[in-house]
Amino acid sequence: MVDKLEERVEELVDRKLGRFEPRNSGRRTDNEIRDKIQAELNKRPKTTHELSKAVKATKSTIKNHCQHLQKLGVVENFEKNDGKNYWRLN
């Protein structure tokens, strides 16, 4: 019973951290995508569209991950004088 409980806890932790995709599935984990977003924002603030091209993910995927990172206090969204919304690291 302890083994099953430990397995279940590990599974829940992996899901929470975004590491539940099998490594051989060809899909990136949530953490890999978020790491790439942060690496791009480390260069300079970027729009969702720019991040989408740089990370090679859809705009909705980028927006979802950026919103998650924003809740964690890692990134923030702001509007420049040109009227566009940008993401930047905190």
Image (tube, rainbow, N blue to C red):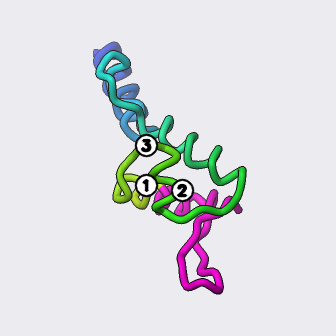
| SS label for mark 2 | helix
Q: In which quarter of the image is residue 8?
A: top left
x 55%, y 63%: residue:
70
Q: In which quarter of the image is residue 69?
A: bottom right
x 47%, y 50%: residue:
53
| SS label for mark 1 | helix
**Residue carrying label 3:** 56
- Please name the amino acid that badge 3 sits on: Lys
**Sequence-first tag of 1 and 2:** 1
| SS label for mark 3 | loop
The disc at residue 62 is 1
User: In the image, is 14 to the left or to the right of 34?
Assistant: left
Using a 10 Å C-alpha cutoff, classify the residue at mark 2 as few (fewer than 14 neighbours), some (14 to 19) or many (20 or more): some
Of residues 1 and 35, which is closer to you in this image? 35
Image location of residue 83, percent across then percent down: 55, 85
Quadrant in which the C terminus is drawn: bottom right
Q: Nearer the viewer, mark 1 or mark 2?
A: 1
Quadrant in which the N terminus is drawn: top left
Using a 10 Å C-alpha cutoff, classify the residue at mark 1 as few (fewer than 14 neighbours), some (14 to 19) or many (20 or more): many
- Please name the amino acid that badge 2 sits on: Leu
**Sequence-first tag of 1 and 3:** 3
Mark 1 and mark 3: Cα distance apart in space: 9 Å
**Residue carrying label 2:** 69
Magenta range: 66-90
